[in-house]
Amino acid sequence: MSTPLRIAVVGSGIGVEHIKGFQELPELFEVKALCDVNLERAAPVAEKYGIGKLARSLDEVCRLPEIDVIDLCTPPAFHFAQIDSAVKAGKHVICEKPLVGSLAAVDSVARLAEGTDRRIMPIFQYRFGHGLQKLKYLIEQNLTGEAFVFNVDVAWWRDGEYYRNPWRGKRATELGGALLSQAIHAVDMVLYILGPAKSVFGRASTRVNMIEVEDCVAMALEMRDGSLGTISVTLGSLAEISRHRFTFRNLTAESNTEPYANSCDPWAFSFNARGNEKQVKDALEQFTPAPERYAGQFSRFYQALRDETDLPVTIADARAALEIVAATYHSSERNEPVTLPIGPGHPKYETL
């Protein structure tokens, strides 16, 4: 594969950020079409970014022979049907978070992927910030030692104006609230670094806005590696921050607090003076940065298709994050810890 992949972006809201990411990599991607039910909103976007084709429906996009990849930037309730249509039209698929609205639906997407040579990639672009990537590199070099604890804060602000968008804040269309729609990135970052969770105990409530879904969450997790951690989430913080802090035997890694870029540099690394400090510092000097955020995920997507290797974010990754969400909701409703994994027969398997 030596020519750029031809992209159709569906949705001109967050889709604009995807377009920017693709256009950072002109040798790998060409955005050929933009689809939106509101062409008045989409037309200025297409003009600004030099996109030649405007479409009003996904069906129209699926019929375009010149499109290789359909990138879904649409409300969550539409994702499953749109993924199904795009794959059956012979297109690769990229899909914004949350991939779908239940673990049963994720498993259906996985079966769909197994039955085709088309690839389906969920979006978790925060993984590819240079700060988080440095920590991942140290883990892969077996330099951190075992993990002890982690602490995560997602403190953002969403007011009534945000929820005037008719699909936001409604269970039928957004499917969940602060944990599913915003903090799922923070959850994925934990899973990316530490691997799967063993159990979850959580509380979810609605305190900031008059909406149908949660906007405040507190949760405690035990990971399969034995490490313990907490994640707190609110959409009622006037001072917006995001923070991840991981404590290992040989080092502690702490992110910056930029609310929407905390996986990027700078990260602070503190070392165990009696441990392998020089070895860790030497490894950090050898770290080679790659593209970040959307461009970082898209460039790795291109490489995976070219080399026929694993995608940088998989359906299994999307399932793992969604499982934490489902477990937190169940724990909050039942006032009990939830042991993972969640499979068929569990009350939160078919619906969140």
Image (cartoon, helix red, strand yellow):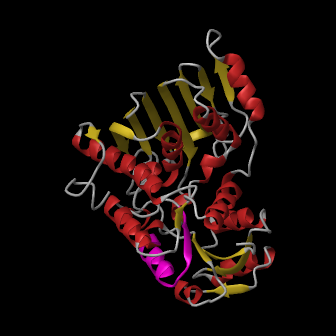
Q: Is residue 209 visible?
A: no
**Left or right side of 168 for 265:** right
Figure quadrant of residue 242:
top right
Spot the residue most to the top: 274
Spot the residue most to the front: 307
Q: Nearer the viewer, residue 239 or 198?
A: 198
In the displayed structure, 96 sits above or below 190; it is below
Residue at screen point 28% across, 42% down = 331
Q: Position of residue 187 (x, y in %)?
A: 48, 44
In the displayed structure, 156 sits above or below 225; it is below
Residue at screen point 69% across, 21% down = 279
278 in the magenta segment: no
Q: Position of residue 156 (x, y in %)?
A: 57, 44
Bounds of the magenta segment: 79-96
In the displayed structure, 143 sits above or below 91; it is above
Q: Position of residue 69 (x, y in %)?
A: 61, 75
